[in-house]
Image: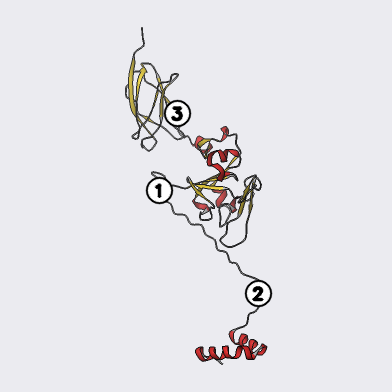
Amino acid sequence: MAQGTKTVKGTVVDQNNEPIIGATVVVKGSTIGAATDLDGNYVLNGVPEDATLVFNYLGMLPQEISAAGQSVINVKLREDAQLLEEVVVIGYGSAKAKDLTAPIDVVKEKELINVPTSSPMAALQGKVPGVNIINSGTPGEGPKVTIRGMGSFGDTSPLYVVDGMFYDNINFLNNSDIQDMTILKDASASAIYGVRAANGVVIITTKKGSRNQDAKITYNGYVGIQKATNLLEMCNSHEYATMMLEANPEAYRSIFEKSVAEFGGN
């Protein structure tokens, strides 16, 4: 006698009762499954009477619920804090750090804000193996960055990707605005971003607001002064005119007399 089947539907939400889009609902041990829509709703057809449903979503703890005697199953998924820390953003999506074989380094916000620098890349000095950072010392200019040695042709700077947008440098970014930085070092970077990534890729994720969080205001500032040393003492206008007249009075007398007549002086 064939086992009876039924239709199960419901809604999947997070801890804040917000609908989760794209959560998977699968009958355990089978290929029957569905994904939640924009409102977090799902409909699962052909579910065996005694089936167990598995609810899953990236960054959330999976749940298994028996469908026996139920046709409407609403689920609230909880965040898996440990899993979220292990997720690494890469060019073509995200992956667990333990599953990565490519040389990828992730630098978190705390490592950047501990060093008072004018450029986020300058704060990475000595923190990432294979990344060479040389500060120019020129006010307002970022450091020279090379990943795994010098490139063969032209510019050897890496490609910077800030929230999906391409940039030649990130000197405009504040260290405190960065959530994390992912550095791609090998050929996998070129496979994702093409020839522009020949010298490596630095992927930056900036901070964003979170739902149901209180507003926070933070301020970090520092002041630096740059002063030239061993400057030669310069002449004032009177001393300069006297020197030029002593050197060649015939050549400069008419010029200075005209200046005195127009602007005053002696």
Q: Which quadrant, please, contains the C terminus?
A: bottom right
The answer for how far apart the CA atoms under marks 2 and 1 are is 53 Å
Q: Relative to the observer, which residue lies in front, 136 or 22?
A: 136
Cβ–Cβ under 8 Å for marks 1 and 3:
no
- Residue type indicated by callout 3: Pro
Is 62 placed above or below 208 here?
above
Task: Confirm whether residue 194 shows in the render.
Answer: yes
N-terminal of the two: label 1 or label 3? 3
The residue beneath circle 3 is: 62
Q: Which mark is residue 142?
A: none
Q: Relative to the observer, which residue lies in front, 31 or 186?
A: 186
**Residue plotted at (43% across, 51% down):** 216
In the image, residue 224 lies at what x, y percent? 57, 64
Q: Relative to the observer, which residue lies in front, 178 or 202?
A: 202
The answer for how far apart the CA atoms under marks 1 and 3 are is 28 Å
Q: Which mark is residue 214?
A: 1
Are there few (<14), some (14-19), or many (20+) residues within 10 Å of tag 3?
some
What secondary structure is marked by label 3? loop
48 lies left or right of 105: left
In the image, residue 40 lies at what x, y percent? 35, 33
In the image, residue 242 lies at what x, y percent? 63, 89
**Residue plotted at (51% across, 57% down):** 220
